Image (cartoon, coloured by chain):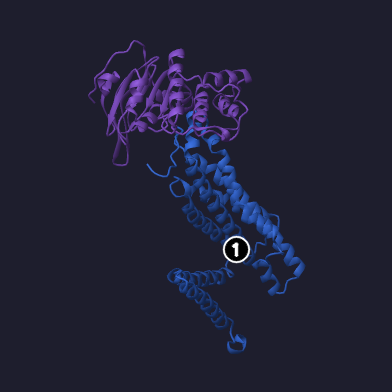
Amino acid sequence: MSATQTTATGAVVLRPEHLGRRVGDVSIVTDISLEVHHGEMLGIVGASGSGKSSFLRLLNRLDEPTAGTVFLNDQDYRQFSPRDLRRRVGMVTQRPFLFPGNVAGNVRFGPLQRSEVLSDEDIARLLERVGLPGFAGREVTNLSGGEQQRVSLARALANHPEILLLDEPTSALDEQAKMGVEQLICSLVKETSLTCVMVTHDRDQARRMCDRVALLEAGRLIQYGKPSEVLGA
Amino acid sequence: MLKSLFHTQLTLGLAQAAIASVLALAVVLLARRRNIHLESDAAIALLRGIVQIVAVGSILALLLKSPRWTSVFLLTGMIIAAGSISAKRAKNIPGARKVSTYSIAAGAGLVTAVMTWAGVIDTAITSLIPVGSMIIANAMNTNGLALNRFRSEVLAHAGEIETALALGAAPEHTVASYAESSIHASLIPAIDNLRSLGIVWIPGLMTGMLLSGADPLYAAIYQFVVIAMILASSGLTSLLSTMMIRNHAFSAAEQLVLKSSG
């Protein structure tokens, strides 16, 4: 790996080291090492099939690395139980995959796995935070794409993650909903110092939202640094 | 008509088999006229069917002279074969063969053993083998249906399952509803058989008992007993196989390994 590194001010919270994944004879992710700092938004960019989403899935161990590992707060993430790791490293995917039922049921899902029951007030607060006040009782089938993605964000935030992985969170949305979700993510990162790693194929979006970007090509890290350095002005 | 032409049971049976095969092939030719080509499949199936059933008949003829305990080996062989056959319905799920064999052995084996111990199934080979094989065959079908349904459900809902995993859910919790629907779907034939018993169909065992001169009322009740045993063994098999296979859909690090590709 060769990469241009720019030091950020926050402490390193997530550090993939020589991370790789092979499936059969095919190398999907190859020898990626980088650092994610507290409170930053790191963008993962690259062409379709460059291994962006595959790399992201390795960060919360949704897939198993075949080489290297990831350090979460300087601790090898294999030392955490998968459930605890995934609570700490949350994920929002391109399609929200909401569970049948109402919005409150979805938001409650994560904490309930640890036998924590969120109060109605907690739910209302989370929904307010994602711009959906009063949506708790709404059936998920009656929500627009943008609203569903906001519920998906609230559901991930309900677990109080230290890091949030975002896999193309706006690519399935229309332009208006996309801008709304984009602004919401930016304000959440700013207000709560949430650390985010976001996969996007949209270079303009990466320029707008990210503090730093990592450019992948054929599963390898080509360059990472400030968006203007990696993607140009 | 045939009886007047053929005077031994064996020649009569062969003639009856030939007529039934000709009838089946006639239907195949009819299908061919509509561009539905079943010729080779049907011909192979008919040939294989007659060879297999004659082989079983020959083995049964030998077994009738064997001690009763030999039936245990035959039933065990049937369970192993059934596990292997129905595991094919769960391709891509590692350990499906082992799961199928254990589930059928537990489901069909336990029901057969308990009912034999209780005196419901006679220990004579002529009774234990046909009834035991019926129970095993139905457990095999149920197991195949359950695994196939479970596999389809997991493949169709991989996104939902991985979303739940990403939120910190336990693997067994993420597939609980799919396991439940698989068990339910796999038991539909067994439940419907019980529901329609005597109304829509008169099963083979009862027909056989009637033909061999048994009391019709006893034959009817005993048929109910067999169908109820089939439901019990199928239910147990389906429950066990679904419970076991759901663990095989995930890795030790709680990752979904049953995927359509990659």
Q: Which chain does purple denote in the image? A: A
Looking at this view, name the residue that lies furthest to the bottom.
B4
Q: How many marks?
A: 1
Task: Check disc 1 and report its element: helix, strand or loop.
Answer: helix
The answer to which of A143 and B135 lies nearer the viewer is A143
Image spot of residue A196 (x, y percent): 40, 21
Left or right of B109: which side holds A28?
A: left
Q: Which chain does blue denote in the image? A: B
Image spot of residue B33 (x, y percent): 46, 74
Left or right of A7: which side holds B54?
A: right
In which quadrant of the rendered view does residue A5 lie? top left
Residue pictured at 39% horizontal, 14% vertical: A38
- Badge 1 crowding class, 10 Å Cα cut-off, few under 14, some 14 to 19, many 20 or more, is many
Looking at this view, name the residue that lies furthest to the top.
A9
Dot 1 corresponds to which residue? Answer: B129
Image spot of residue A154 (x, y percent): 52, 23
| Label 1: chain letter | B
Q: Amino acid at mark 1?
A: Ile
